[in-house]
Amino acid sequence: MKKAIAIWIFFTLSVSAAHSQEADSLRRITMEFTDVALKEALDSIAAHFNLRMSYSDTKINSTRLISGSYSAKSQQDFLFQFLSDQGLNYTIIDDQIVVFPINTSQAIKITGRVTGVEDGAPVAFASISLPEVTKGTSTNEDGEFELDVAELPLQITVSHIAYEKRTIFIYDDHAPLDIQLNQAPRQLKELTVKSRRDKNAYYQLLKNARKLISDKRDEWLYGKAFYRQKSERQDRYTEIFEMFYDVKYTRNGIADWALQEGRYAFQNKDDYDVFLYNKNFTQLSRMFSLLQPETESYLLPFHPDAREMFELSLSDVIEYEGRHIAIINYVPFTSVGRPAARGQLYIDFETSEVFKMTGTFTDGRMSVIGFSDSESSWDN
């Protein structure tokens, strides 16, 4: 057996130049088309490489006739040669050759709506991101989003802490996307029931989380921030203002930021003066943090005396990326005589790490932002 291998290697190395050229021609991929529909040519190429061909008829005229002779040593070179001659480009995803027009440098707008599989309800403030790209957006209160991209196809990831993350491929922008997310697994019934019987556990978890935040409050972090402001006049929204920022922050709040992208829309501009307040991002990002700031003019749940100020209840326990996350409702006691937030906390049962905090202030005594007139209000 060893001798046979040695002979085979020697023979391969001793092959003549003529035989080498002949073998090279046999290894080449060669196809010729004469007045055939592009669709037929694509089907033939897909069959040759044992792959599926995927493309959008709205972007590619697959019925047009083509002619030409193409030859290359590799699958990659052949696809590039043939498709570029047709004004097309490609990418391979799993067992598919995804074909699309060569980018004309025109922005492509992707739109869609994210809902829950179980109830069909919109998933508000879900994150829409492009892997390996810093650009992204989030859904609005109705689960809707739009995103400008340079080219298609592409891959986006949709995530929300209360739902399972989902990655999808987008081949064209012909129609709005309908994206459905499954709720995060709720397989911790025993833990949930036990936790609901022990209200002291909520306050202890809150206390542990507060200590963890306090111990790391000066650690510098970098990330993304999203700010949305809506203006209302006489029960009718007239203005929406959205900004996306790169931010430098600690657990005590945002310290520095750089504006990356903004959107602004205004209705009834003939009736009202246009007002645009980018300064609110500066003000609100400094005012509100996870920890109770050094003021008693308004109250947040991570207050040293939270037990006397907020009633806590367990909404649910979910599994998120291998972690057990408690969703805790917090509501200020009626006896609290100051403006106080109400909302939800997402806290890791094991590590006490805070994943998310939502809060709403509805107390009319709270003068956080001034109003332009008596008929206007802002929702931040």
Image (cartoon, rainbow, N blue to C red):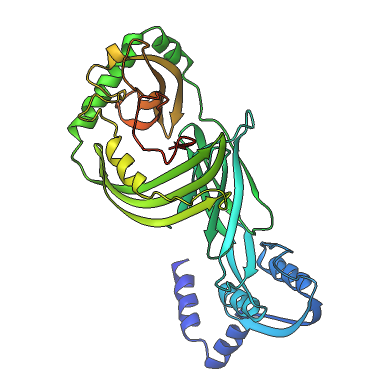
Q: How many marks?
A: 0
Does residue 235 show up? Answer: yes
The residue under the point 64% across, 32% down is 120
Say whether residue 329 is left or right of residue 29: left
In the image, 198 versus 338, the foreground residue is 338
In the image, 175 versus 131, the foreground residue is 175
Q: Position of residue 68 (x, y in %)?
A: 72, 85
Residue 93, above or below 352: below
In the image, 62 versus 276, the foreground residue is 276
Kindly give the residue lying farthest to the top in the view shown.
197
The residue under the point 52% across, 46% down is 239
The residue under the point 58% across, 59% down is 109
Q: Position of residue 132 (x, y in %)?
A: 42, 57
In the image, 121 versus 99, the foreground residue is 121
Does residue 26 show up? Answer: no
Say whether residue 199 is left or right of residue 238: left
Figure quadrant of the C terminus: top left
Residue 101, above or below 267: below
Q: Position of residue 8 (x, y in %)?
A: 50, 76
> Can you tell which quarter of the image residue 178 is in?
top right
Say whether residue 78 is left or right of residue 306: right
Kindly give the residue lying farthest to the bottom in the view shown.
18
Residue 367, above or below 171: above
Q: Position of residue 278 (x, y in %)?
A: 38, 50
